[in-house]
Image (cartoon, helix red, strand yellow):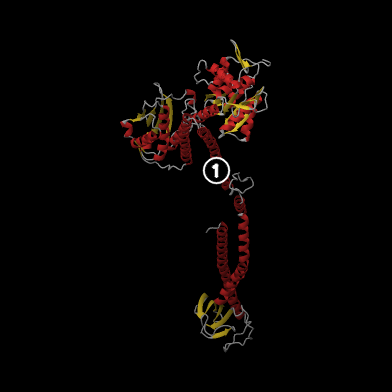
Amino acid sequence: MRVLVVEDDAVLLNGLQVGLGLAGFTVEAVATCADASAALDTSVFDAIVLDLMLPDGSGLDVLAALRRRQSRVPVLLLTARDSVPDRIAGLDAGADDYLGKPFDLDEVGARLRAMVRRSGGHAAATLQWRDIVLDPASMGATRGGQPVRLSRREFSILRALIDRPGQILSRSQLEERLYGWQEEIESNAIEVHIHNLRAKLGPGIVETVRGVGYRMAEAGL
Amino acid sequence: MRSIRARLFTILLVTTGIVWLSAIAWIYLSTKAEVERVLDARLTEAARMVSSLITSQEIAIRKAGGVPAMVAVPHVSYDRQLSCQIWGFDGTLVGRSESAPGQPLTAAKSGFSETTIDGETWRVYAVANPELGIRVLVGDNLYVRDRLVADVIRGLAFPALLILPVLAALLWLSVGKGLAPLAAIASALGVRRASDLSALPDNDSPSEIKPVIRSLNGLFARVSTARERERDFTAFAAHELRTPIAGLKTQAQIALGSNDEAIRNNALRQITVGVDRTARLVRQLTDLTNAESGELDDDAGHVDVGRTLQALADDIGQHHRDAASFSISAELARLELGVNPSLFMVGVRNLLENAVLHSPPDKPVRCDLRRDQGFEAITIDDCGPGIPEDELPKVCSRFFRGRNQTAAGSGLGLAIANLAAERMGARLYLENRAEGGLRAELRFKKTVRNGKAAQGNEIRPI
């Protein structure tokens, strides 16, 4: 899951980047409204974590601009101002959730997963495809009730594919979901992860569409 | 005297008493004069009457002498007032009234005279009757006259004395009534809660109380403004502290939850940075409150600029080991200023700290002296990114953090420096240098050196 974090405090920004990264999110971290707008213009995110008081303006302005563009991406506001009127103003400006500082890192992760789940039209906390069940909170996977040990990246790829069964995801789409801007992408990393997934889950699960990308296998194959 | 009521009461009572006493004294004098005039006239009349009675032979003068026997009249207060003697020119007592003494009432031949006989003073009128060769003396006992005047005065004073306690009671009550508005204010203020700073109503209060009420209301307004500002500031400061605390908590959770040594070490490093920054923020908040609330002594002091700057530079160097160094010019090091040392240190410290935090570590921050018409200025030049021109007017507001902020910036440093400058009677100017970096200039009026801080310095944030 790609998450944009907008926060001007360097220590907190680093904490969110590392902490959410460990929880299985792919995190883009920016510190200003301008950078946030630029990031939103150029890539797609599954969720945004937004601080309200930024050096070059209010996070609410970024949020308002986002909603003007009819973007439905879920936004979690993180702010030191968490009085009831502040919360109401934030939610009415188009935010999906509101968290006062200081917060619990795990709670941020949980709220992000819940927001993404709802925006994808799911209510259940787990994702299921045939007999494979994914739990984004623990990054655990089972097949036929048997736990399968997946790495963070393998889990992310599987999750991206299961999210939209039948849809083909290109290698670059998968790379974007897996890596932040700052991260170096190894040239054949996706192939290696897909290979490992097939080895762990067995054949006939992840299908290669030659020259296009990958998808979950069609039913009956 | 502590109580206005007792004071007013005493003043009123004493002045009333004085008025009464003078009135009585006046009445005494005028009564006495009038009594004398009337009785003298009567004396004259009586003497002439006796003389004329003898002349008209209505009363036979018994040449044989001997005092006519007169019936004793019961003694009442104003009898025996008049005594009459008829003497022959030859010195024989022809006749006398019952109360008259044996010896002559006066030695004077005619007219008024006063004589003391047997300890009693007499006022005597003598009239000579040459036809019969007699002299009529009519005397008035002065004691009786004095008693008459004293009775009049007593008759006036006695009711006055009786009335006095009633008057005193009335005065006491009226003064109390007159002071009721004060008591009303006192009780209104007495039952107020400490948080109630609303104005007292002053439309129906007496004109003497109005100034007091207005002053009180003015004070209330000032106190509540100050309180509101304090409350805003506390709320703002609390918000401001929550972000670094959130950062610390997040990093601590990462350090606790991760087995990867690199990640844990990074989190711990971030925690150190966060703690430093939070500590600085707390110190700056304290500085700001102190500089604002006037806890720093306002009296002009004495600052050895060279030594102070060096001490501050050393201290900042200890807190920011990898940061840029300072170079202080010899001319500046010799400067001495007559300003408050605490304000000076608070202000300059924040400027110096800002300069090193924004400067690359290999470019020293230059502190120099600039003299110009009417002022001398401490200039602090850094080689940092400067401040975008559109942000210059805003940088001195509290918690403003510009685009070129540093990780340690709290948005308070320049606000503190500006406030401290104002309080010292100095002015802070910020400008981007042509060769890059920021110049912070602290201008002191020349008069500042000679004792008292210059008054009337126009103080405005840049």
Residue with the mark numbered 1: B223
The answer to which of B298 and B81 lies nearer the viewer is B298
The reply to whether residue B374 is visible in this rendering is no
Question: Residue B179 at x, y = what percent?
Answer: 60, 54
The answer to which of B237 and B171 lies nearer the viewer is B237
Dividing the picture into quadrants, the one containing residue B18 is bottom right
Residue closest to the far top? A211
Q: Residues within 10 Å of mark 1 (few under 14, many from 20)?
A: few
Instruction: Give the residue type that dot 1 points to.
Output: Val
Dividing the picture into quadrants, the one containing residue B428 is top left
Tell me which chain the residue with mark 1 is part of.
B
Decide: is B30 above or below B141: above
The answer to which of B276 and B340 lies nearer the viewer is B276
Dividing the picture into quadrants, the one containing residue B67 is bottom right
Relative side of B111 to B360, left or right: right
Question: Residue A126 at x, y = what percent?
Answer: 65, 27
